[in-house]
Amino acid sequence: MEVLWLTWRQHRMQVLLTTALLAVLGAVLLISALGAADFAAQNAPAADCVADTPACSAYLVEMNERIRSVGELLGWLPLLAPAMIGAFWGAPLLAREFEQGTHQLTWTQSVTRRRWLAAKIVGLGAAVTLGGLVLAGIVEPWLAAFDVPPYNVDRFDMSWFRVVGIMPAAWWLAAFVLGLATGALFRRTLPAMAVTLAVCALAFFGLLRAPSFYATPERVVQAAVMDEPEPDDSLHVTSYWIDGSGVKYTAQERELALAGPCGTDETTKKYARCAFSHGYRQVAEFHPADRFWQFQWTEAGILLIPALSLGGLAVRRTLRPRI
């Protein structure tokens, strides 16, 4: 118990600040969700309304504006939140002890070095993981308030994929362990924080569009005009055109080939019917919505396996007596 109490005394500022920020975000999302739910209850048209009718169009525009105003804030969280967790929770954990020399006193007391490390890492790691789950828990009801037909919220969309499910917890825990490892390696707080921030940024931008490659996408070939070839809530990968022999064309190449017989206005169904009549087919590749959790666990593994491995090496190095 004394180790847990010491951990709380040393790291209570990070815990309290993170809790306060989550509480503020929760209040903002609650106000936004209540406003959206009230607007939907009073103005939602039929679920099958046509988007270009006045009532449906006005509803979609208003809901899109409401979700965008808060969504822009949430859009930064998948990058900023793990970076801050790694830099301010993980990096100082060991680096500050080494930098200030307090480890020489701490590790000569009745509490063993192994027990001291275990209590700190497990306790703070559990708090970080819980914080990530809390973030997902407050974002999900907010999204649900907007998910009122005909407006659709696609949680597979990259705008939301990393703020729902297990993604916040996985990113936060991986960043925490990364910060722990850099602190053990550099034994200086500022260099450890800087490296942690840089690696978190590289990981975020490296995995930004990675879910498209987590599995082989499904493929739909259109031989007739279809408004929505991809199912609802699916993750779009790519679309292109093929001719009768299966040769792949970009939209620009197909436009040049059909400029004579079909014109150049690709927005009309008449143009699409003309293209199909000349033997062209449109191909759409996507991941269906039922792969959402598969992709969540896949990215969690991509983050946590190397992070935990690196963290294990850092702990081993810390436990090894220095000669």
Image (cartoon, helix red, strand yellow):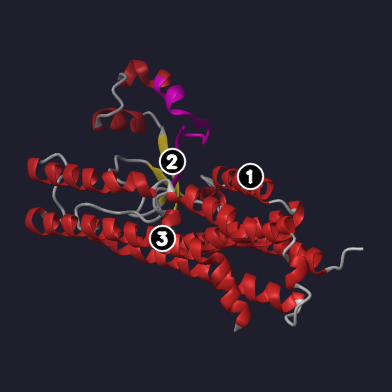
Q: Given this view, does label 1 or label 3 mark the residue nearer the observer?
A: 1
Q: Position of residue 157 (x, y in %)?
A: 40, 50
Which residue corresponds to the image point at 25% horizontal and 60% vertical from the top-left? 30
- Label 3 residue SS: loop
Q: Is residue 2 left or right of residue 243?
A: right
For disc 1, the neighbor class at 10 Å (few under 14, some 14 to 19, many from 20) is some
Residue 281 in view: yes
Mark 1 / mark 3, whichever is N-terminal: 3
Of 212 and 140, nearer the camera is 140
| SS for callout 2 | strand
- Give me the disc on residue 298: none
Residue 164 is marked as 3
**Mark closer to the observer (1, 2):** 1
Residue type at numbered disc 2: Val
Q: Give coordinates of residue 14: x percent, y percent.
A: 50, 61
Disc number at residue 194? 1
Q: How many labels does the image show?
A: 3
Q: Circle 2 is placed at which residue position?
A: 283
Q: What residue type is labelled 1?
A: Ala
Distance Cα–Cα, label 1 vs label 3: 27 Å
Q: In this view, does 253 lie above or below 27?
A: above
- Give above or below for 274 relative to 204: above
Taking the magenta stretch, the answer to whether it contains residue 178 is no
Residue sitting at x 48%, y 60%: 168
Amino acid type, residue under disc 3 in the picture: Val
Magenta residue span: 236-255
Quadrant assignment, res 240: top left
Q: What element carries label 1?
A: helix
Q: Which residue lies furthest to the right in this view?
A: 323
